[in-house]
Image (tube, rainbow, N blue to C red):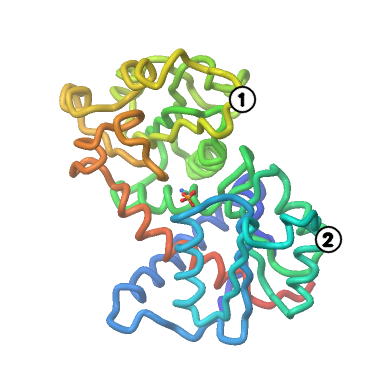
C-alpha cells in the first residue's frame, strides 16, 4: 500500500487535485513503467479489488489502457458499454451504477457525454470514481499521461512552453491539460480558429494565437487536438480542407521552424486534417509514447486511489 495518499478519494478532474498529487502520480508511474517493461508485467497490488469500466461514449485508447492497467495490477475487471446495456431501455445513470455496485464493485472508471457525470456519481456512491472523460469538461488521466510524456524530454516544467492546437472549444483534453501544465509551472498557449477558442480563456492564464506558425515558433511542445465534428452542432469553419490549410501541421511547416518542436496528439488522429501523416509518424512525434505511458500513469492512479482511507 502507498505510504502517501492522494488528496482526494476520486479523480474527477485536474482542477480538483494538487501539484503534490501530480508529483506523487508521476513518481508512482515511474515505478509501474519499470514493471510493465519487465518480462512479468503483473503485480498483485490490487488483488481483491473489483473495478467497473463504464463507457457511455466510444473509446479505444482510454478503455483499453484502463483495462490493461487494472489487469497488470491483478484487479478483477468488469466492462460496461452503454450501447449494449439496459441504458438503451431508459435506465438512469444512478440506477445503472447502483446495480453494478450491488455486485460489490470497489472502483468505477466512467466516460460519459454529460459534463459532471463522474462528480454526480461521487456524491451518491461510496466507490472511488475516476473520470475517463466527461463531455467537454475534463479528461484528467489524458492530461496526466500527456504531462508525464513531456516530462521524459525536459528537466523541468517551469517556463516550458506548450501550445495546445485545434478545437479548444469542445475539448476536455485541452481544459485538463491547461490545469495540469499550469499547476506544474509551464506556460500554455492555445491556438486555433477564433470560433474554436472559448471566449475569456485568457482568464485561465493562457496565451491565445490564431496563427499556427506563430504558436509553433513559440512552443517547445505542441499538443494537437482532434476536430470534434461529433460535438459541433453548427459550422465553426468553412470546410475541413480550409482548416487543414490554415491550422494543419505538415512536414514543410515543421521543417521550416527555427527550433524543433515535440508533436503530441491524444488520438484519435484525423490524418491530413490536424496532422499530416509524415508529421504524425515522424521522430518529432511522441504520440505512441503517450499511449504507452497511459498504462503506467493509470496504474499509478488506480493504485493510489485504492489505498484505504480513515475517513
Ligand atoms: N485519447 C482518448 O481519449 O482516446 P479514446 O477516445 O480512444 O479513448
Q: Tell me if 188 is positioned left or right of 172 in this view.
A: left
On the image, the x and y values in percent for residue 304 come to 57, 70
Q: Residue at x 43, y 32 (%)?
A: 164
Quarter occupied by residue 259: top left
Quarter occupied by residue 219: top left
Q: Residue at x 66, y 70 (%)?
A: 107
Q: Nearer the viewer, residue 287 or 31?
A: 287
* Label 1 SS: loop
Residue at the front extreme?
Answer: 89
- Disc 1 beta carbon < 8 A from ligand 1? no
Q: Is residue 249 above or below residue 267?
A: above
* Label 2 SS: helix
**Mark number for residue 124?**
2
On the image, the x and y values in percent for residue 114 come to 70, 43
Residue 160 can be seen in this image: no
- Answer with mark 2 or mark 1, whichever residue precedes in sequence: 2
**Mark number for residue 233?**
1
Q: Nearer the viewer, residue 162 or 223?
A: 223
Q: Is residue 207 above or below residue 72?
A: above
Mark 2, other Cα within 10 Å: few <14 / some 14–19 / many ≥20: few
On the image, the x and y values in percent for residue 95 come to 82, 62
Amino acid at each position: 500500500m502507498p505510504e502517501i495518499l492522494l488528496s482526494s478519494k476520486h479523480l474527477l478532474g485536474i482542477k480538483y487535485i494538487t501539484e503534490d498529487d501530480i508529483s506523487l502520480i508521476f513518481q508512482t508511474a515511474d515505478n509501474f513503467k519499470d514493471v510493465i517493461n519487465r518480462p512479468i508485467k503483473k503485480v498483485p497490488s490490487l488483488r481483491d479489488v473489483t473495478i467497473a469500466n463504464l463507457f457511455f461514449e466510444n473509446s479505444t485508447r482510454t478503455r483499453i489502457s484502463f483495462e490493461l492497467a487494472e489487469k497488470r495490477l491483478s484487479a478483477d475487471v468488469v466492462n460496461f458499454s452503454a450501447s449494449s446495456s439496459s441504458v438503451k431501455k431508459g435506465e438512469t445513470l444512478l440506477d445503472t451504477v447502483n446495480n453494478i455496485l450491488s455486485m460489490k464493485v470497489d472502483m468505477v472508471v466512467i466516460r460519459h457525454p454529460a459534463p459532471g457525470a463522474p462528480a454526480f456519481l461521487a456524491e451518491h456512491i461510496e466507490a472511488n470514481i475516476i473520470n475517463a472523460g466527461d463531455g467537454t469538461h475534463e479528461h484528467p488521466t489524458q492530461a496526466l499521461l500527456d504531462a508525464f510524456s513531456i516530462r521524459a524530454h525536459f528537466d523541468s516544467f517551469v517556463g516550458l512552453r506548450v501550445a495546445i492546437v485545434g478545437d479548444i472549444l469542445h475539448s476536455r483534453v485541452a481544459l485538463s491539460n491547461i490545469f495540469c501544465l499550469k499547476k506544474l509551472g509551464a506556460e500554455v498557449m492555445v491556438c486555433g480558429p477564433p470560433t474554436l477558442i472559448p471566449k475569456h480563456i485568457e482568464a485561465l492564464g493562457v496565451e491565445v494565437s490564431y496563427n499556427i506558425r506563430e504558436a509553433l515558433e513559440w512552443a517547445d511542445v505542441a499538443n494537437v487536438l482532434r476536430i470534434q465534428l461529433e460535438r459541433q452542432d453548427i459550422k465553426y469553419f468553412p470546410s475541413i480542407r480550409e482548416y487543414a490549410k490554415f491550422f494543419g501541421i505538415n512536414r514543410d511547416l515543421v521543417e521550416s521552424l527555427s527550433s524543433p518542436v515535440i508533436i503530441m496528439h491524444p488520438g484519435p488522429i484525423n490524418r491530413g486534417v490536424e496532422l499530416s501523416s509524415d508529421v504524425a509518424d515522424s521522430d518529432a512525434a511522441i504520440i505512441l509514447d503517450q499511449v504507452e505511458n497511459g498504462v503506467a500513469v493509470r496504474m499509478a492512479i488506480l493504485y493510489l486511489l485504492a489505498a484505504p482511507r480513515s475517513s
